C-alpha cells in the first residue's frame, strides 16, 4: 500500500483524510485539497489514468457444433468400428485409442476443426441466458449487415444500376434490423445490471462484510487470475515440496488404526455393468463438458444408445483387468494461486 502526500485536510489543521492505493494499481500523480465550504473536512481531488489494457488474444481450435447434423453423425458412427464388436481390440488402452481415432475421423469429415480468435473476459454475474440470446441475435444481424455491404461493393464494381439499387435496399434493411435489435439489447443489459446490483445491495444492507464484497465485485476487484508464468515443472516441484513438508511434520504421529472386516465379507471382483446402466447414467449427466471431451455432453447423450455397447464393454474390461485407460489420466490444469509466496 502507498500513502500519497497532500496538504492539511481539516479546517483546524492536520490531515484526517488520505488517499491510499495498492502497489499494483495506477497511482495518482498528485493529490490536491480544496475547501468547498460544505464541511470541516476539505475535498481531496486526484486523477488516475482510466485506460484499460486490452484483453489478451488467444487462438483456439474448435468445431462448429451448431452446424452438426446429429443424424449424419449417427449414420457415420453406425458404419465405424465402434459399432462392430468383432473389430474391438482386447486391450483397454487400445479401445480408448480406437474410440478417439474413429470419433475424430468422423468429426473431421462432418465439422472440421477451425481456428477461432477470441478475447477471454470474465462474465458479469447479471449476464444471464436472456442476455446471451439477445447478444447472439445482435451479432447475427451485424454479420448480415456486413454481408449486405459486401454485396453492394460487388454490385458497384460491376457497374450495373439494377443490381446496385437492389443491394442498396438490402443494406438499408439490414442496417435498420441491426439497429432495431441493438437498442433493446443495450437497454436489456442496463436493466439487468441495475436490477441485479440494486437487489444485491438491498440484500446485504445489514451485513457490511457481504456488502463490501458486492462492491468489490461491482468494481471488478477480487478476481484471482490464472498464472501464465507457472510451468508444469515448477508446479510439480511445489507440490512435491509441500507433500514432503506434510510428511516430515506427521512422521512422528501414531500409527493409524483401521476397523476389521466382518467375517464373510470380501470384494474379489467388481460387478459388471450393463448397457442399460450406461444409458441411464449418461442421460442423467448435466450438460457440462471438459476440454478433453471429443463430444459435448448434450451430443453424447443423443448418441449413447448407439455407443453404449462399446462403452459398456470398454468399462467392463477395465474393471476386470484393474487397468485405467491412460488417456483418462490426462487433464488440463489451470493453476490459480491463492498466496503471493507461491511460485509464479
Image (tube, helix red, strand yellow):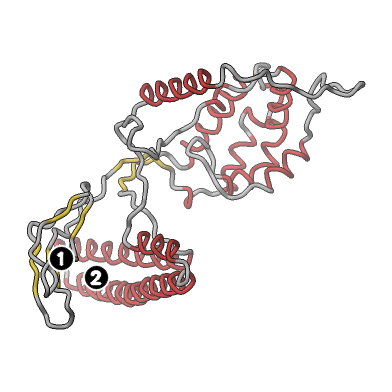
Q: Name the residue located 69 percent from the left edge and 22 percent from the top edge.
A: 318
Residue 281: image x %, image y %? 71, 43
Q: Residue furthest front?
A: 12
Q: Are marks 2 and 1 in contact (CB under 8 Å)?
A: yes
Instruction: Between residue 58 and residue 47, name the one nearer to us.
Output: 47
Determine if residue 279 is in view: yes
Image coordinates of residue 344 in percent, x first then y, are: 31, 32
Would you place residue 183 above or below residue 115 in this image? below
Residue 132 appears in the rendering: no
Q: Nearer the viewer, residue 116 or 250?
A: 250
- Residue placed under numbered mark 1 in the picture: 156
Residue 232 coordinates in the image, percent (x, y) = 38, 25
Residue at the location (35% across, 76% down)?
187
Quick one: which residue is furthest to the bottom in this view? 38
- Taking depth in this image into account, of 19 and 299 the one nearest to the observer is 19
Residue 167 is marked as: 2
Identity of the residue furthest to the right in this view: 264
Q: Quadrant of residue 227?
A: top left
Disc 1 crowd, CA 10 A, few/some/many (<14, 14-19, 20+)? some
Give the left or right position of residue 277, taking residue 290 as reference.
right
Q: Is residue 46 left or right of residue 128?
A: left
Q: Please give the name of the residue rendered at 55% of the width and 25% of the height, measured from the top-left corner.
A: 329
Q: Residues within 10 Å of mark 2 (few under 14, many from 20)?
A: many
Amino acid at each position: 500500500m502507498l500513502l500519497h502526500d497532500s496538504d492539511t485536510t481539516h479546517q483546524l489543521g492536520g490531515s484526517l483524510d488520505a488517499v491510499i492505493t495498492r502497489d499494483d494499481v495506477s497511482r495518482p500523480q498528485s493529490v490536491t485539497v480544496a475547501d468547498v465550504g460544505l464541511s470541516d473536512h476539505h475535498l481531496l481531488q486526484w486523477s488516475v489514468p482510466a485506460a484499460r489494457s486490452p484483453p489478451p488474444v488467444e487462438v483456439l481450435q474448435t468445431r462448429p457444433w451448431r452446424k452438426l447434423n446429429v443424424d449424419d453423425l449417427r449414420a457415420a458412427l453406425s458404419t465405424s468400428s465402434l459399432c462392430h464388436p468383432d473389430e474391438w481390440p482386447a486391450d483397454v488402452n487400445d479401445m480408448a485409442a480406437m474410440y478417439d481415432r474413429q470419433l475424430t475421423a468422423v468429426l473431421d469429415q462432418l465439422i472440421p476443426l477451425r481456428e477461432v480468435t477470441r478475447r477471454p473476459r470474465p462474465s458479469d454475474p447479471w449476464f444471464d441466458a436472456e442476455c446471451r440470446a439477445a447478444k447472439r441475435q445482435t451479432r447475427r444481424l451485424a454479420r448480415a449487415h456486413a454481408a449486405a455491404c459486401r454485396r453492394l461493393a460487388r454490385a458497384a464494381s460491376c457497374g450495373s444500376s439494377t443490381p446496385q439499387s437492389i443491394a442498396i435496399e438490402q443494406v438499408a434493411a439490414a442496417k435498420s434490423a441491426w439497429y432495431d435489435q441493438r437498442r433493446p439489447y443495450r437497454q436489456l443489459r442496463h436493466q439487468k445490471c441495475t436490477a441485479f446490483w440494486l437487489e444485491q445491495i438491498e440484500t446485504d444492507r445489514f451485513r457490511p462484510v457481504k456488502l463490501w464484497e458486492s462492491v468489490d465485485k461491482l468494481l471488478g476487484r477480487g478476481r484471482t487470475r490464472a498464472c501464465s508464468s507457472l510451468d508444469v515443472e515448477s508446479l510439480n516441484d511445489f507440490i512435491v515440496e509441500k507433500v514432503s513438508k506434510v510428511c516430515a511434520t506427521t512422521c512422528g504421529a501414531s500409527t493409524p488404526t483401521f476397523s476389521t472386516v466382518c467375517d464373510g465379507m470380501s470384494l474379489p471382483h467388481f460387478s459388471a455393468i450393463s448397457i442399460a446402466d450406461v444409458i441411464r447414467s449418461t442421460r442423467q449427466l448435466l450438460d457440462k463438458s471438459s476440454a478433453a471431451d471429443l463430444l459435448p455432453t448434450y451430443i453424447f447423450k443423443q448418441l449413447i444408445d448407439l455407443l453404449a455397447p462399446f462403452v459398456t464393454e470398454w468399462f467392463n474390461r477395465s474393471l476386470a483387468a484393474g487397468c485405467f485407460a491412460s488417456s483418462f489420466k490426462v487433464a488440463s490444469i489451470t493453476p490459480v494461486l491463492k498466496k503471493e509466496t507461491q511460485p509464479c
